[in-house]
Amino acid sequence: MIIFAHPSYLRSRANRALRAVAERMDHVTIHDLYETYADFLIDVEAEQRLLLDHDHIVLMHPFFWYSAPPLIKEWLDVVLDYGWAYGEGGTAMAGKTWTQAVTTGSAAHTYGPEGSNRFTMEELLRPFEATAHLCQCRWQPPFVVHSSRQMTPDALADAAHDFAAMLEGLIHG
Ligand SMILES: Cc1cc2nc3c(=O)[nH]c(=O)nc-3n(C[C@H](O)[C@H](O)[C@H](O)COP(=O)(O)O)c2cc1C
């Protein structure tokens, strides 16, 4: 299941291109948080039921201020509840894979100790990795598309192809 979050999807190019290939794939559920919860009032039980029905969780979003759009944070805060996702008796997420699928505005070379963004994507995504770990999920290498606002149609198509291959890899183990 792709947990999709883009607050201005009408203006999206990169996430739109990636999502389009996922929409054509079997065994992939796309759950659009901003479409479902424009008011930010998340139905926790419905979200938990959806999670129980899926083995592989992909959090897909544009990279915003080294993190995610705010509805992702709200979703994490209210859905991954103590005693359900972590803590005493909280094993509902155990064994699922967790993958971040992220598009960035900045170029790949800016993400590192010498670059303007100073840290690598792996480092910046650590809060998600720690969350996955606490919920006993299996953290997968993040899928990252850089320079997403400058991409040519061919480059977007290549990224979408790679995204589909990553999803196929999850589905078929
Ligand atoms: C509020 C906001 C914060 C952003 N923060 C970052 C950032 O921290 N790093 C980065 O590389 N790009 C950042 N960007 C650029 C977006 O990641 C980029 O526009 C997006 O990935 C493009 O995807 P889309 O075509 O699907 O909208 C930011 C954009 C906005 C609007």
Image: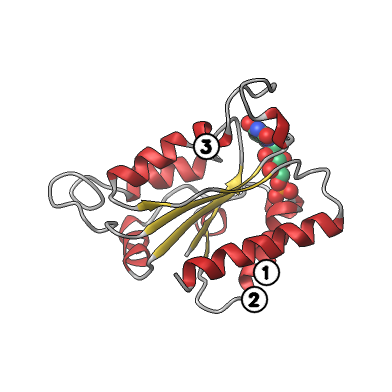
Element marked by disc 3: helix
3D distance between C-alphas at marks 3 and 2: 29 Å
Q: Residues within 10 Å of mark 1 (few under 14, many from 20)?
A: some
Name which residue lies at 23% across and 46% down. Answer: 86
3D distance between C-alphas at marks 1 and 2: 5 Å
Location of the C terminus (image quadrant): bottom left
In this rendering, the answer to whether 11 lies above or below 50 is above
In this rendering, the answer to whether 72 lies above or below 15 is above
Element marked by disc 1: helix
The percent position of residue 87, horizontal first and vertical second, equals 18, 44
Label 2 near label 1: C-beta < 8 Å?
yes
Q: Residues within 10 Å of mark 3 (few under 14, many from 20)?
A: some
3D distance between C-alphas at marks 3 and 1: 25 Å
Element marked by disc 2: loop
Pointer 1 residue: 21
Pointer 2 residue: 24
